[in-house]
Image: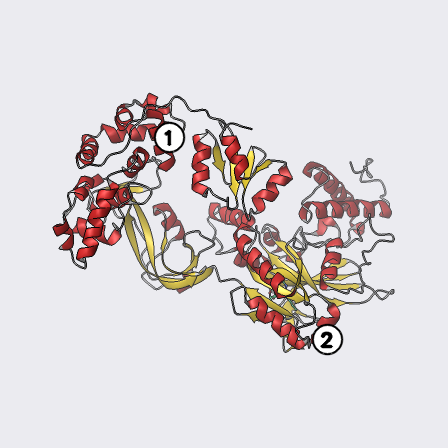
């Protein structure tokens, strides 16, 4: 508990030293809260101290100082930002264009050449840092007090955005030598003039929340965290800027005047960063010292892999020569230091145009609007279309044919239109509306109450749904008909050669061979593949029927529980609910499906065509060693795939979750386990390898 310095009333003459103590204490708590993420006191306790200071300052305005924690948000809206001349120019860094890991080798080779090192010389020591995707900022402190914050501008002249930057909780407005370390510690004193350079950015979760709030208030949303951060920094009204959640990482210095003792005399860039951290600035945990090219490559690859899991956007990594004496020796070319390089990752966002919006019909009749895009290379692949999900989503983004849009593809996530650029909209572009009829079969499209999706009401009358149903049945995870792909199914259905699933097995060699672009040999292969697919298993067959909400895991569970297809088809909803994986939605869906005579007819005909599997006796309730337990999988396991491990866990009554929390029973970690493993250690959650998981599944704890 912080001592109550002002237990009496704010009206009694306060003593300057005591106010200073209160301010210092508030600064320290804010630092622990915003920068270290490790508060010592509750929010309420902090608020109480803060209000105490406010009360004193209200009663004694002459005691208010600009660096008081109460003075972060203040000042009037500006008409324009004043210009600032940077005492030390704000440089940019040369970009290594090669977005392969080998870009690190070219950089290292260049450094060795410039330093005159031959092959026998030891590796050069570097610092590797993330390249934060925000805005460069120069923070000027005089006697430890933040006096000016300026944007980079053209590197010589920036804009004075001090009022806005003061509102960022992570940026100290008064520097203190860390209390516990001050006397005789290794942390140098704060120099009289200190310019700290770094990046102002917005965390992804803050960005999502901000956009959410903008939407609620009917205001414009931001395209990405970078744009939102830039908008906040250049906001003329500091009260509005204060509501935009910004963060900061320090990565370098500008002007610094030495103290009387001649300090701070840093020897390495890494040391400098550690000192900035000790003075209260946020420095990324991902900054690392690296020896030579191999460690730079390893760094590049590991950051590229974890990029999507970070809480903020980065667009690459930066390598810097660590020894400052070497940096000085190497100097600059025009506006760029010779001792640093930005090694970019492939861009995850690009601008392209919408050439059309089509509505696709899925297996279950779901209508999905899809934007057809002018081909664009983003996130490592060429993207030609992006889903707009459903009517609400398409309306919310207001994507129109002819629009220029920002397309994003991050990691393995499917490409998305993140925003429209309204200033580039062609005149007369029409808003998108969902069709009233299925674009394939003309049946009415319905959107049921409480649902977000429109569905074609045509069922298997709709050829799009029939095609999808056939492809679903023929896929590898169902009965598997090798070679029966989308093009062939289109030909067969559009040519009215087949209508239903059983028609597949009535296909003769002649019918197939007569299709355009079908060689005799391929036709033969399809016939063989169809023949082979007849011998299947109950779970595969059941999954292949494409019953809504019945995925592979549920199909397996149903087969295990009931043993035979007839038992499943005749089970009541109540009996179905007794199956581990089955809830009311699934039970209802199964019942509805098998209550339709034409679905039973399809099953009978498939059997008559020779599709068969081995049936078993209904299982006694299998032991459920993981009942009620939640597990998290991370990394690559030696023999089990993600899906296999998940199935096994679910069959044993457990659940698989995507993130680790206190409720997680076990984390199963394989090779290259990521942040989930760290989280498990942090929370003290039990960690297993594959062998441990198997023992658990067998009922040995
Ligand atoms: S160092 C003398 N380090 O990238 C070197 N810059 O063109 C000065 N950036 O405008 C920059 N992360 O805004 C440095 N870890 C990092 C960085 C970084 C992002 C930005 C910075 C600068 C641009 C370089």
Q: Residue at x 78, y 58 (%)?
A: 144
- Quarter where residue 576 is shown: top left
Residue 578 visible, this angle: yes
Q: CA distance from mark 1 to mark 2?
A: 69 Å
Horizontal relation, residue 327 to residue 296: left or right: right
Please name the residue shown 32% across and 23% down the image. 617
Instruction: In the rendered view, tell whether residue 400 sits above or below residue 614.
Output: below
Q: Which mark is residue 329?
A: 2
Percent of width and height locating residue 662: 59, 34
- Quarter the C terminus occupies: top right
Residue for badge 1: 557
Residue 664 in sight from this viewpoint: no
Instruction: Give whichever of discs 1 and 2 has the lower sequence position.
Output: 2
Residue 569: quarter of image: top left
Q: Is residue 178 above or below residue 320?
A: above
Judge left or right: residue 218 versus residue 231: left
Q: Is residue 115 above or below residue 219?
A: below
Callout 1 touching callout 2 (CB < 8 Å): no
- SS at badge 1: helix
222 sits left or right of 571 in the view: right
| Residue at position x 43%, y 41% in the image | 643
Image position, residue 653 (x, y; %): 46, 29
**Quadrant of picture, ligand 1:** bottom right
Residues 485 and 217: in front is 485
Can you say which quadrant of the picture contains the N terminus?
Answer: top right
């Amino acid at each position: 508990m912080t001592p109550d310095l002002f237990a009496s009333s704010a009206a009694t003459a306060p003593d300057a030293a005591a106010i200073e103590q209160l301010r210092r204490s508030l600064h320290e708590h804010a630092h622990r809260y915003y920068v270290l993420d490790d508060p010592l006191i509750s929010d309420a306790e902090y608020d109480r101290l803060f209000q105490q200071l406010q009360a004193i300052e209200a009663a004694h305005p002459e005691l208010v100082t600009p660096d008081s924690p109460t003075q972060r948000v203040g000042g009037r809206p500006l008409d324009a930002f004043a210009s600032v001349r940077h005492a030390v120019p704000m440089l940019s860094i040369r970009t290594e264009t090669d977005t392969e890991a080998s870009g690190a080798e070219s950089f290292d080779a260049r450094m060795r050449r410039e330093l005159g090192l031959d092959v026998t010389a030891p590796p050069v020591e570097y610092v590797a840092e993330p390249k934060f995707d925000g805005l460069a900022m120069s923070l000027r402190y005089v006697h430890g007090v933040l006096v000016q914050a300026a944007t980079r501008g053209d590197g010589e002249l920036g804009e004075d955005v001090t009022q806005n930057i003061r509102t960022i909780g992570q940026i100290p407005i008064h520097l203190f030598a860390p209390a516990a370390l001050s006397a005789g510690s290794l942390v140098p004193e704060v120099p009289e003039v200190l310019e700290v350079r770094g990046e102002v950015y917005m965390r992804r979760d803050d960005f999502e929340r901000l956009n959410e709030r903008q939407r609620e208030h009917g205001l414009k949303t931001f395209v990405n965290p970078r744009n939102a951060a830039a908008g906040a920094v250049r906001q003329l009204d500091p009260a509005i800027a204060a509501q935009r959640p910004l963060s900061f990482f320090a990565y370098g210095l500008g002007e610094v005047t030495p103290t009387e003792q001649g300090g701070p005399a840093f020897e390495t860039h890494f040391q400098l960063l550690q000192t900035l951290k000790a003075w209260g600035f946020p420095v990324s945990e991902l900054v690392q010292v690296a020896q030579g090219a191999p460690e730079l490559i390893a760094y590049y690859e590991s950051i590229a892999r974890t990029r999507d899991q970070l809480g903020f956007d980065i667009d690459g990594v930066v390598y810097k020569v660590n020894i400052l004496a070497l940096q000085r020796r190497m100097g600059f070319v025009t506006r760029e230091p010779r001792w640093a390089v930005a090694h970019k990752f492939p861009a995850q966002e690009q601008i392209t145009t919408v050439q059309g919006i089509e509505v696709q019909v899925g297996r279950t009749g779901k209508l999905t609007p899809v934007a057809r895009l002018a081909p664009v290379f983003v996130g490592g692949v060429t993207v030609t279309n992006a889903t707009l999900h459903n009517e609400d989503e398409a309306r919310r983004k207001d994507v129109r044919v002819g629009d220029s849009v920002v397309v994003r593809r991050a990691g393995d996530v499917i490409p998305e239109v993140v925003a429209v650029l309204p200033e580039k909209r062609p005149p007369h572009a029409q808003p998108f509306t969902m069709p009233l009829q299925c674009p394939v079969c003309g049946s009415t499209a319905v959107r049921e109450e409480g649902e977000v999706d429109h569905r074609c009401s045509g069922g298997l009358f709709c050829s799009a749904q029939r095609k999808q149903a056939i492809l679903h049945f023929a896929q590898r995870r169902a009965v598997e008909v090798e070679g029966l792909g989308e093009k062939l199914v289109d030909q067969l259905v559009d040519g009215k050669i087949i209508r239903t699933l059983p028609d597949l097995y009535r296909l003769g060699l002649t019918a197939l061979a007569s299709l355009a672009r079908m060689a005799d040999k391929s036709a033969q292969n399809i016939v063989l593949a169809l023949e082979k697919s007849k011998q299947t298993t109950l779970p595969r067959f059941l999954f292949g029927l494409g019953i809504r909400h019945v995925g592979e895991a549920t199909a397996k569970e149903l087969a295990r529980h009931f043993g035979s297809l007839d038992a499943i088809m005749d089970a009541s909803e109540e009996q179905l609910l007794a199956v581990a994986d089955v809830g009311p939605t699934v039970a209802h869906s199964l019942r509805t499906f098998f209550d339709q005579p034409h679905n039973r007819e399809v099953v009978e005909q498939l059997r008559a065509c020779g599709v068969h599997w081995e049936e078993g006796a209904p299982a006694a309730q299998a032991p459920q060693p993981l009942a009620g337990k939640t597990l998290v999988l991370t990394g690559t396991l030696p023999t089990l795939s993600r899906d296999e491990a998940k199935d096994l866990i679910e069959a044993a009554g457990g659940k698989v979750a995507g993130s680790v929390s206190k409720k997680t029973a076990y984390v199963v970690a394989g090779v290259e386990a990521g942040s989930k493993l760290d989280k498990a250690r942090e929370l003290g959650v039990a960690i297993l390898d594959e062998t441990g998981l198997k023992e658990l599944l067998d009922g040995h704890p």
